[in-house]
Image (tube, rainbow, N blue to C red):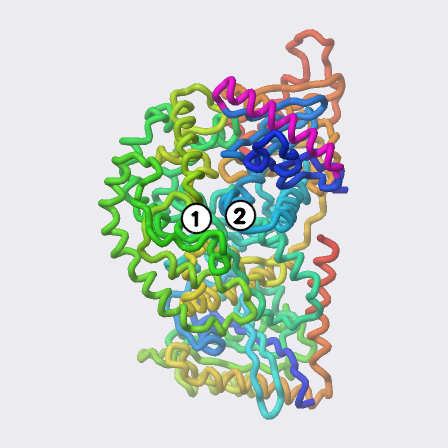
């Protein structure tokens, strides 16, 4: 079943730093190769070819390579430092989807493991191979082809759910935020989003861990009593990019404003850019390449979190920091801002430092006190150790760009910076604009990653996932407060959602539609959404093609795509994309443009029909 | 019998704002939050306790009192072992509505012998000085409607809350001994449903 919708034919991560001399075998550089059963010489062949071509092209064009075609496959490429990623799909898959899948995969890895270089220094290849495999299968499995086309969130079918229950979920999340250590959260039911306070991208990442713990929880779970309070809570360290963290820490009012700038960090090639109504408007009104004046009010409010990252970055991956022979905690802190940060930022940061001190000194003190206390309430949680230590290391050290990395690494960063400034002048829009606040950091992978904690509270199929400050775990009082204030409501919500019948698939009407909300990254469709649901379906193929056109042509608003027997209408605005196909009724067309052609009535039919699904195309 | 832990489902019903959620929270977590939002639908918490040598897991279901949440809460009445009818001593209307709550419960819980079903009546907000319902009125209602035990509670001060729940448990246990009907049959039902649901959906 899953085989049908598996899009990725190859994926590999290649570390060029392992293959420098003439005699070095290519296999030394292959960190991970999918499918794993591929013979090693074939792996070497592909890695060698693609990496070579990729480097060559990017050096000739002095811009990053995004896509390479090789026979019947196209490969999304990502290069960073010595690392080279390639993800291959069949040529039919839209380029945007392939590139997006690769981006998602890399970001997912970084979310759970921190920077690539560090992960490979701290963990064995085998360990990380298992993780790549897991993320890859997570991104590809379990959802319909339409979901893949749009890379959208899997949400519960809200047509069957009483809106009051969605309100209930939102209120649970809000109640958790009364604890200041809780940044944001989401509630998932059986692997689908019920409510989320996070960006779609972040929610998607969080869902991977959820699905993991779910499968684990399912196996040993016999007939436990309905009170599943123990072992229902777990946590893991995750790594947020600076912009993700800023978004979470900014006051809710600011978030709409912020969404202006978030899309900038990715290239215009990707559809998220098109999605944000506000962002597009912002970029036309104020020069988008200039993050300065228009951003400054926000900048003020973010500064504390930058300082925060300065501190916490010091620790290598916190969960492993104790047993880390490669990276002893730096003894002599380097002077701050040694990484080529712009000096005006440095000044600003220094200004904010005092604010930071007062703002955060409480938290740190707290965590130190509580470190000594035992989290006996939530026993059986092996994950909890990392957090406490984190609180310690986070105290007043100086900014070091990438924790334990060597000076050698830093020179790479410098190189990146040079490349970025080149790109900012508009050479190529392939990878990304400068991020909103800090011009020095470009891609999410290049910006420092800030360790945070992902806290999960499971009630059977229902999961409350919260992104919390690392010292939340050592703050017993906060943990208990969050746990107890949400438990009853979670129990109740679970009971409600469980009793909702999955809803008869319903006789498919005389039409098919798919409506993609770009802002929330959600999909509404009346096409059977089950996994493996006929990817060869003409509607799906037409949608995929139209989506690609919309992505590539920013000015394109409406399009009809047709074969001899069917016509699919697509329309999009900055906030949504909608696709519609009317069944039955023979298409009257003679192959030449004809005003009586029934395809031309599709737009009005779509407008009319989709109103009852809550899709307003007027 | 004494070593067996039974699961008892107890449900709190009553008008919105009489303090059902606060009573549950006071009893289970011993906390009081004056700024709770309306309960939406239902919520529940479990508490283990021992009453007269019986190990019991009390599953306390808190419900939304507002009329607009009716369709969300009523499906969860079924399977209750005891019903705590709650009103607020400073709100006469909530007292007058007790009869309606009882009717609604009996109807949706599909109680076979309503006259034998264990109800317990709670007059909450004892801490409030301006009473609208006297203890005598309340006791009279209880007597006339089936000799229900009556407790005046304060979730805020923790007055009588634990005692009321323990009484509820005693009533249920007494019922069970009379009918010689083992409780765990209910427990099994509770587990079967979710399990079958997960297998068909995954």
Is A598 left or right of A444, judged from the image as shown?
A: right
Residue B30 position (above or below residue A289) = below
Structural crowding at the residue carrying mark 1, measured as other residues with C-alpha within 10 Å and reported as few (<14), some (14–19) or many (≥20): some
Is A272 left or right of A212, judged from the image as shown?
A: left
The secondary structure that dominates the magenta segment is helix
Quarter of the image that includes the N terminus of chain A: top right
Q: Position of residue A81 (x, y in %)?
A: 50, 34
Which chain contains the residue that carries disc 2? Answer: A
Check residue A426 for magenta coloring: no
Residue A119 position (above or below residue A485) = above
Query: Which residue is at a point 66% across and 8% down the rendered structure image?
Result: A593
Q: Is residue A406 visible?
A: yes
Residue A267 position (above or below residue B50) = above
Query: Which residue is at a point 36% across and 46% down the rendered structure image?
Result: A400
> Where does label 2 land, which residue?
A121
Dividing the picture into quadrants, the one containing residue A459 is: bottom right
> Where does label 1 land, which residue?
A404
Is A519 left or right of A5, judged from the image as shown?
A: left
- State how far apart marks 1 and 2 are (Cα): 10 Å
Which chain contains the residue that carries disc 1? Answer: A
């Amino acid at each position: 079943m899953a085989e049908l919708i598996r899009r990725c034919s190859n994926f590999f991560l290649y570390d060029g730093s392992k293959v420098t001399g003439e005699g070095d075998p290519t296999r030394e550089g292959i960190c991970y190769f999918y499918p794993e059963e591929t013979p090693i010489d074939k792996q070497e062949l592909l890695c060698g070819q693609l990496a070579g071509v990729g480097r060559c092209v990017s050096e000739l064009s002095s811009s990053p390579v995004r896509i390479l075609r090789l026979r019947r496959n196209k490969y999304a490429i990502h290069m960073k430092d010595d690392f080279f990623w390639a993800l291959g799909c069949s040529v039919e898959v839209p380029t945007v989807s392939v590139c997006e899948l690769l981006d998602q995969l890399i970001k997912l890895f970084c979310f759970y493991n921190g920077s690539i270089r560090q992960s490979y220094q701290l963990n064995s290849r085998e360990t990380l191979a298992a993780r790549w495999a897991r993320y890859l299968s997570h991104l590809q499995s379990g959802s319909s082809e339409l979901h893949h086309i749009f890379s959208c969130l899997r949400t519960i079918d809200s047509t069957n759910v009483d809106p009051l229950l969605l309100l209930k979920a939102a209120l649970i999340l809000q109640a958790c935020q009364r604890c200041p250590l809780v940044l944001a959260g989401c509630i998932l039911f059986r692997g689908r989003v019920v409510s989320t306070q996070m960006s779609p991208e972040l929610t998607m990442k969080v869902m991977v861990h959820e699905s993991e713990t779910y499968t684990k929880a399912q196996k040993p779970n016999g007939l436990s009593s309905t009170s599943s309070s123990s072992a229902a809570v777990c946590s893991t360290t995750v790594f947020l990019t600076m912009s993700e963290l800023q978004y979470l820490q900014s006051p809710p009012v600011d978030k709409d404003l912020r969404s202006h700038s978030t899309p900038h960090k990715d290239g215009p090639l990707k559809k998220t850019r098109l999605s944000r109504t506000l962002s597009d408007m912002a970029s036309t009104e104020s020069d988008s390449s200039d993050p300065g004046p228009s951003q400054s009010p926000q900048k003020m409010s973010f500064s504390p979190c930058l300082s925060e990252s300065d501190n916490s970055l010091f620790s290598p991956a916190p969960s492993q920091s104790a047993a880390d022979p490669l990276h002893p905690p730096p003894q002599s802190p380097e002077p701050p801002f040694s990484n080529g940060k712009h000096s005006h930022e440095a000044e600003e940061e220094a200004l904010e430092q005092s604010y930071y001190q007062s703002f955060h000194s409480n938290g740190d003190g707290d965590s130190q006190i509580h470190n000594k206390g035992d989290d006996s309430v939530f026993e059986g949680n092996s994950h909890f150790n990392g957090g406490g230590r984190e609180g310690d290391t986070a105290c007043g050290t100086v900014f070091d760009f990438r924790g334990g990395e060597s000076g050698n690494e830093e020179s790479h960063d410098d190189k990146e910076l040079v490349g970025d400034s080149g790109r900012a002048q508009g050479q190529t829009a392939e990878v990304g604009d400068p991020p909103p606040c800090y011009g020095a950091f470009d891609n999410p992978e290049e910006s420092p990653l800030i360790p945070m904690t992902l806290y999960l509270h499971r009630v059977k199929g229902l999961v409350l996932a919260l992104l919390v400050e690392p010292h939340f775990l050592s703050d017993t009082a906060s943990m208990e407060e969050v746990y107890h204030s949400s438990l009853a409501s979670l129990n109740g919500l679970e009971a409600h959602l469980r009793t909702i019948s999955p809803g008869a698939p319903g006789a498919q009407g005389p039409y098919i539609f798919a409506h993609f909300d770009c802002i929330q990254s959600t999909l509404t469709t009346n096409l059977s959404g089950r996994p493996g649901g006929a990817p060869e379906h003409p509607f799906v193929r037409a949608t995929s093609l139209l989506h690609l056109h919309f992505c590539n042509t920013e000015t394109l608003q409406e399009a009809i795509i047709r074969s001899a027997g069917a016509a699919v209408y697509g329309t999009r605005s900055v906030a949504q994309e909608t696709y519609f196909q009317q069944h039955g009724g023979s298409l009257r067309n003679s192959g030449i443009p004809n005003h009586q052609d029934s395809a031309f009535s599709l737009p009005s039919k779509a407008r009319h029909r989709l109103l009852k699904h809550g899709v307003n195309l007027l | 019998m004494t070593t067996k832990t039974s699961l008892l489902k107890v449900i709190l019903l009553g008008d919105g704002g009489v303090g059902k959620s606060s009573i549950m929270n006071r009893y289970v977590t011993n906390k009081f939050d004056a700024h709770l939002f309306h309960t939406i639908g239902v919520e529940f918490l479990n508490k283990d306790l021992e009453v007269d040598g019986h190990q019991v897991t009390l599953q306390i279901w808190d419900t939304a009192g507002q009329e607009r949440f009716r369709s969300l809460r009523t499906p969860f009445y079924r399977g209750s072992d005891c019903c705590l009818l709650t009103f607020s001593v400073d709100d006469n209307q909530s007292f007058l509505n007790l009869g309606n709550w009882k009717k609604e419960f009996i109807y949706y819980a599909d109680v076979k012998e309503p006259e034998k079903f264990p109800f317990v009546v709670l007059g909450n907000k004892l801490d409030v000085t301006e009473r609208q319902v006297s203890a005598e009125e309340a006791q009279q209602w209880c007597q006339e409607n089936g000799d229900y035990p009556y407790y005046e509670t304060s979730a805020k001060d923790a007055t009588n809350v634990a005692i009321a729940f323990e009484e509820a448990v005693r009533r249920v246990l007494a019922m069970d001994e009379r009918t010689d009907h083992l409780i765990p049959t209910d427990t099994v039902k509770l587990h079967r449903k979710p399990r079958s649901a997960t297998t068909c959906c995954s």
